[in-house]
Image (cartoon, rainbow, N blue to C red):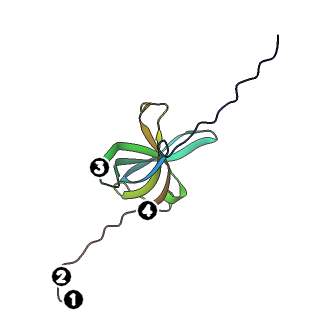
């Protein structure tokens, strides 16, 4: 029998429609952990995640606890802004939905209190 050629493995084509980066904000809740390839990895829970227009896009999301998040010295209730990659979810409870990953440009919103005292 003649040898047949194996079909070349095609790389998935990513378009701008399948991988999107967007800006989000949410309320820091707590730090957690998950099983990683090389051992436990720290994660953080962000609730009431909103897009740039202020619409709630997801009730909660677990993100990797990156050095950028660690530098903020977060307390429960702090509001954080971040950019993230929006990907199609291929497993887990949100299969067929979307997930947020690769957070960057992370910062904590500061509470600014203005005094209405005059004469100072």
Disc 4 versus disc 1: nearer the observer: 4
Query: Residue 117's mark?
Result: 2
Q: CB atoms at circles 3 and 1 under 8 Å apart? A: no
Inter-mark Cα distance, 4 to 1: 32 Å
Q: What residue sits 54% from the left and 58% below the top?
A: 67
Q: Secondary structure at mark 3?
A: loop
Inter-mark Cα distance, 2 to 3: 35 Å
Q: What residue sits 35% from the left and 57% below the top?
A: 79
Q: Quadrant of the N terminus?
A: top right
Inter-mark Cα distance, 3 to 1: 40 Å
Q: Secondary structure at mark 1?
A: loop
Q: What residue sits 35% from the left and 51% below the top?
A: 51
Based on the displayed image, in which of its 4 quarters is residue 111 positioned? bottom left
Disc 2 versus disc 3: nearer the observer: 3
Q: Secondary structure at mark 4?
A: strand
Inter-mark Cα distance, 3 to 4: 19 Å
- Residue 41 picture location, percent across and down: 56, 45
Inter-mark Cα distance, 2 to 4: 30 Å
Residue where numbered disc 4 is placed: 107
Based on the displayed image, in which of its 4 quarters is residue 37 positioned? top right
Q: CB atoms at circles 1 and 2 under 8 Å apart? A: yes
Q: CB atoms at circles 2 and 4 under 8 Å apart? A: no
Q: CB atoms at circles 3 and 4 under 8 Å apart? A: no
Residue where numbered disc 3 is placed: 55
- Residue 90 picture location, percent across and down: 49, 32
Q: Residue furthest front?
A: 2
Q: Residue furthest top?
A: 1
Q: Residues within 10 Å of mark 1 (few under 14, many from 20)?
A: few
Query: Residue 120's mark?
Result: 1
Q: Secondary structure at mark 2?
A: loop
Disc 3 versus disc 1: nearer the observer: 3
Left/right of residue 67 with respect to residue 55 in the rendered view? right
């Amino acid at each position: 029998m003649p040898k047949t050629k194996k079909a070349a493995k095609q790389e998935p084509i990513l378009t701008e429609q399948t991988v999107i980066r967007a800006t989000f904000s949410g309320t820091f809740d707590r730090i957690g952990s998950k099983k990683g390839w090389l051992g436990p990895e720290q994660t953080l829970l962000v609730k009431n995640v909103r897009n740039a227009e202020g619409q709630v896009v997801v009730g909660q999301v677990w993100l990797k606890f990156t050095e950028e998040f660690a530098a903020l010295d977060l307390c429960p209730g702090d509001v954080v802004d971040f950019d993230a990659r929006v990907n199609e979810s291929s497993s887990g409870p949100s299969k067929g939905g979307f997930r947020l990953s690769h957070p960057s440009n992370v910062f904590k919103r500061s509470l600014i209190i203005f005094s209405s005292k005059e004469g100072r």
